[in-house]
Each structure stands twice: as C-alpha cells, then as structure tokens.
Image: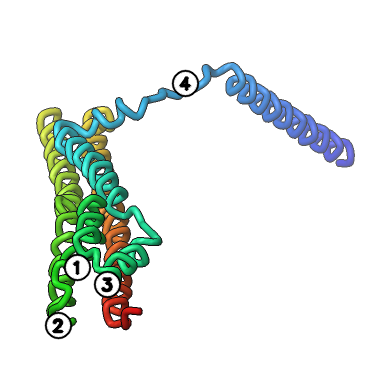
Amino acid sequence: MLNFILQAGAAVSSLATSTDSNSNSSVVTGIQTAATSPEITETKISLFEMILKGGPIMYPIGLLLLISIYLLIERLLVISKASKKNETLVLNLKEMIHSGNIDNARSMCKNMNTPESTMLEQGISRIGQPIIEIREAMNKSGVNEIGKLEKNLNVLSIIGRIAPMFGFVGTIIGVITIFRKISQSGTVEIVQISDGLYQKMVSSAGGLVVGVIAFIFYYWLNSRLDRLAHRMEDTQIKFLDMLNEPTK
C-alpha cells in the first residue's frame, strides 16, 4: 500500500513538471512571436491632404477664410490710419481760434484728414452759433466718420455665421456618402466608410474654425473702433469747453 502511494505521488510530480515546462515553452514562443512580428507602420498625412479629404465643400469654406483675412488687413490699415492721435490738436486749435485765425484752423483740420479732425472742422465752421447746434453738428459728423470705418465689418459677422453652416452641409454629404457605399457593397467595413467619415469630420471642423476666426476679427476691429469713438467724444468735450472759455 505504501509503495502504491509513493508511485502515485511520483506520477503527479512528473505531470506537474511537464505542465510547467509546456507553459514556459508557450510563453517563450509567444514572446518570440511578438518580437519577430513586423512593426506597424504609421501613415502620415499632411494638413493639405487632410483638408482635401473634406470634399468639394472645403472650397467655399476656404474662400470664406480668404475673404475674412482680406477684410481684416484692409480694415486694419484703414482704422490704424484713422486712429493716429495728435496730442496737441485741441491746443493748437485753441490758439488759432482765440487769435481769430478760423480759416487756418479749418485748413489744418482738413489737411489732417482723420475722423477726429473732420469732426472738429464741422465744429469750427459753426463757431458763433449756439453750443447746442455745434454739438449736434459734431455728433453727426462723428457718427458718419465711424460709419465709414465700419464698412464691410458686417461681412465678417455674416461669414462667422454661415461658415459653420457650410461645414454642416459637408457633414450631411459625408453621411450620404457613407450610406451610399454601404448600400452598394452590402457590408459595413471601415475601408468603405472612411472617405465619408473624413468628409464629415473635416468639413465640420473647417466650417467651425473659419467661423471662429471671422468672429474674432469682427469683434477685435469693433473694439478698436469703440476706442476711437470714445476718444472722439473726449476731444469733442475738450473742444466745446475750449469754446466756452473766455478769450484773453
């Protein structure tokens, strides 16, 4: 009986050793297979190629971007020129007006050719009239000058609204492309729907990016105009106070 138990124990021990050996062999084989497997190559794609995958709808979106950039540069140059500040303008006008050189004061304002000087020229031309009429004329002139500087800014606001809509149209076209390829092949495979997914996502992203850029340009230019308008109001107040000062 004791001899039988010893033989059974030896058999179990031999079986366990064989199992561990097979397990280790499998692990080693798996490691070797993983080590010898070919590396996965990463396919790189340029930004331009990615944009082209957005489909034909990317052409109008790109055109809207170019228009936004053009309007930014054009309006920025105009507003920067109009925002040139002359710290001594009111003081020089004060000396000319109090000395009776009204025509010289008007000529100086015309030669400067800025919204601020144009507004002052309207006030100088009405010297001798009631202050209320002078203020009203200067207010109208200031509003007209700011209105000229706001030219085409609404186009940026419109682009900011319609560019995401173009992106949404591209999304719809991409979804239609996906379902068309699925119906033609009868199967759903990533290779078949990848083009539609690219078009869907790229066009949506492109429309949103252009819309955000247009809105940033629009509000930034408007902030510069607001600063100019506030400065013109301060200049108007100084000019009217100067007219109320007694001449020496």
For the residue marked with disc 4, what is the amino acid? Answer: Thr
Quadrant containing the C terminus is bottom left
On residue 130, which mark appears?
2
Q: Residues within 10 Å of mark 2 (few under 14, many from 20)?
A: few
Q: Is residue 233 visible?
A: no
The residue at the point 61 percent across, 25 percent down is: 30
On residue 41, which mark appears?
4
Distance in Å between CA atoms under marks 4 and 3: 69 Å
Nearer to us of marks 1 and 4 is: 1
| Corner quadrant of residue 10 | top right
Q: Is residue 241 visible?
A: yes
Tell me the residue that label 1 is attached to.
124
Q: Secondary structure at mark 3?
A: helix
> How many numbered marks appear?
4
For the residue marked with disc 3, what is the amino acid? Answer: Gln
Quadrant containing the N terminus is top right
Near-viewer residue (117 or 154): 117
Tell me the residue that label 3 is attached to.
236
| Corner quadrant of residue 106 | bottom left
Near-viewer residue (49 or 5): 49
Nearer to us of marks 1 and 3 is: 1
Near-viewer residue (72 or 101): 101
Q: Residues within 10 Å of mark 3 (few under 14, many from 20)?
A: many
Residue lying farthest right?
Answer: 2
| Labels 1 and 2: the sequence-earlier one | 1
Nearer to us of marks 4 and 3 is: 3
For the residue marked with disc 2, what is the amino acid? Answer: Pro
Distance in Å between CA atoms under marks 1 and 3: 11 Å
Nearer to us of marks 4 and 2 is: 2
